[in-house]
Image (spheres, rainbow, N blue to C red):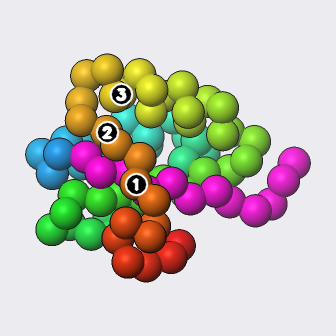
Amino acid sequence: MQTNSIQWLLEVDKKDIAYIVSIFEGYDNLAVVRTVDPARSIIELIISPDYLEDTRRLVDSLSKELHVRKVKPEELGFCI
């Protein structure tokens, strides 16, 4: 089991943030979701390396029904 987490920044529609949070809460320990920039609708996924592939599949699936775009930290002007 690895101990370091992986952080992804995602741009989503503001109206979808609560839905995305609830989806991830339904998958215990898959990833923690937090809003890092509410004005720009940027959320952060904090992912256990053990669940990286499962998280990738879930985000891919969500992106088929919602606007989800992976964002690089430098696009936002800060590092995670």
Q: Secondary structure at mark 1?
A: strand
Gap between marks 1 and 3 measured at Cα: 16 Å
For disc 2, the marked residue is 68
Residue with the most extreme front position = 75
Left or right: 18, with 33 as reference point: left
Q: Is residue 69 magenta?
A: no
Say what amino acid the circle numbered 2 marks. Answer: Val
Q: Which mark is residue 62?
A: 3
Tag on residue 51?
Answer: none
Q: Which range is magenta? A: 1-12
Q: Amino acid at mark 1?
A: Val
Q: Indicate which label's residue lies in the foreground, 2 or 1.
A: 1
Gap in angstroms between the C-alphas marked 3 and 2: 7 Å
Image coords of residue 58 (percent x, y) = 48, 28
Dot 3 amino acid type = Leu
From the image, tell me which residue sits under label 1. 71
Look at the image and tell me whether residue 32 can be seen: no
Residue under the point 87% across and 48% down: 1
Identify whether 40 is placed above or below 1.
below
- In contact (CB < 8 Å): disc 3 and disc 2: yes
* Disc nearest the viewer among 3 and 2: 2
Q: Nearer the viewer, residue 8 or 21?
A: 8
Secondary structure of residue under mark 3: helix
Q: Residue at x 41, y 47 (%)?
A: 70
| Secondary element at tag 2 | strand
